[in-house]
Every structure is written in structure tokens, then in C-alpha cells.
Image (cartoon, rainbow, N blue to C red):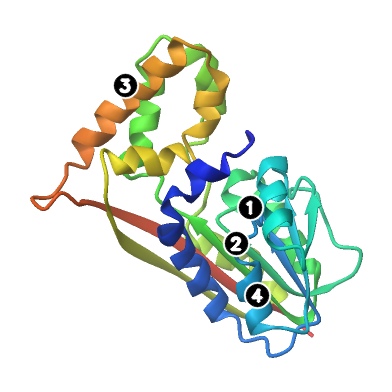
Amino acid sequence: MSDWDPTQYLKFAGERLRPALDLLARIPAAAPATVVDLGCGAGNLAPLFQQRWPQAKLIGVDSSPQMLAKARADYPQASFVQADFATWRPDRSVDVLYSNAALHWLDGHDTLFPALLETVAPGGWMAVQMPRNFAAPSHTCVIETIEQGPWRAALEPLLRRRPVGAPQDYWRLLEGRAASLDICEIEYLQVLKGENPVAEFVKGSWLKQFLDRLQEPERGAFEADYRARVRAAYPPEAGGSTLFPFRRLFILAQRRQ
């Protein structure tokens, strides 16, 4: 996973924040002592956690030094840890383990998700949201651009065609370990502004790992190829807006007592 550019990622802060808020609203915990935001990014959820649970100790975990630098500068009242969140585990059980738009970057969900639930105290909550939009043109255009260009040998090893399983896959993983389990999908119709905004949206997340692998002039050629494909797939509406449906998977599990 490449280092993040907070400025590019947060160009669409509102669209990225909405599912994070929806995930937070699903958690019924009344007064957790410890809340972990796994994959906290730039920490922009910190004030929302603190508003809802003012007495809780908040720990943000992320692997990106750029994102964490912004988080520490903007939210000094929270604790932030730089770590690989594939292997990071808390020193003691936590009451809420929250992860928004992060775990799709990791492989091995069949062992990862049960292990993460084990870090939650009995009766506590694990709340996860992951994009499940990988069959949409925004992402299939990435695959087409890679497979049909001179950069295929360099970029194809980075491709992960099914980063997130089906909802029933996660139910089967967690059902025997959870006191309650709620899994659903929501498709958000994102109405974006600007010139080729879907390309800009994806550039802030999924596309970045491929761009970072290339040097100029190949990097510019790769991005131009992708931008042309995705613009054709998402043409602007008559009023200038671009419609970008985006599907996301929500998992809320309470650990057994």
C-alpha cells in the first residue's frame, strides 16, 4: 500500500465522510472506555468520536506517515499510532473497534476478521465499512488500462480483482463468534462536480498505488489512458454533474460475552 496524499484524498471529503457517519451511527455502544479507529487516515473522524463518547480514550491507527502527520496536527487530543494495521493489535481489549474504508487493502480476510473481533472485549463492538465497487467501471477501467498498456508487466502484480468478499462470506466468518451480527450493503448515488470527477475520486485512493509504481512519462500516459476510459464510462449530465454510484459493505458484530 503506497503512501497517501491527504490533499487528493480529501478532495471528496463529503462523499467519503457519509458512509463513515452511517457506520458510526450503527454502533449502539453507550459509554465505551476505549475506541480504536483502525485505518484512521487523516483523523477527520476524531471529533465525531469525541462528541459521541467524550469520556472514551480514542486511538487512531494508520500506516501512512503523511496522513498521521495531519491527524496529529489537527487533533492533538487523540492518540495516533503508526503501524501496519494488518498485524497491529491493542495491548488490551477495546470496547469499540471501528474501521472505515481500510480493510479492503488487506488480504486474508478469512483470518483477519475473526482475529480483529477477538481484540474486542466481550459485549463490545466491531464496526467495519469497505468499498465493494470493484465491478463498476471506475475500477474495471483500471484493469483495462493496465492490461492494454506497455506497463502491464510492472502493474499487473499489484492487481487484486476481488479485494472484498460477498456479504454472506463475512456472515459465515463471524456468525459463530458474534452475539449479534448485522451485515448490509448500501449503494450511494454520488453527485460529483468538476472535470472528470470520477477519475479524481479514484486517483485519491485505488489508482494511487499504480501511479506510484511508474515513472514519467509512463505515469502521465497511464493516467491519461485511465482518465479517457473513465470519462467515457461516466459522462456528465446535462447540468454538468457526474453521477457516480458507489456500493459499500457494512459489518457490525458484537462479541459474545
3 or 1: tag closer to the N-terminus? 1
Q: Position of residue 187 (x, y in %)?
A: 34, 63
Few, some or many residues within 10 Å of mark 4 (<14, 14–19, 20+): some
Q: Amino acid at mark 4?
A: Phe
- The quarter holding residue 125 reads bottom right
Q: Which mark is residue 44?
A: 2
Contact between labelled residues 1 and 2, with CB atoms less than 8 Å apart: yes
4 or 3: tag closer to the N-terminus? 4
* Residue 212 in view (yes/no): yes
The residue that disc 4 covers is 49
Q: Is residue 78 above or below residue 3?
A: below
2 or 4: tag closer to the N-terminus? 2
Q: Amino acid at mark 1?
A: Gly
The residue that disc 3 covers is 225
- Secondary element under disc 3, as helix, strand or loop, is helix
Name the residue rendered at 66%, 57% in the picture.
40
Q: Position of residue 144 (x, y in %)?
A: 34, 26
Disc 2 vs disc 1: which is toward the camera?
2
- Secondary element under disc 1, as helix, strand or loop, is loop
- For this orientation, the residue located farthest to the bottom is 30
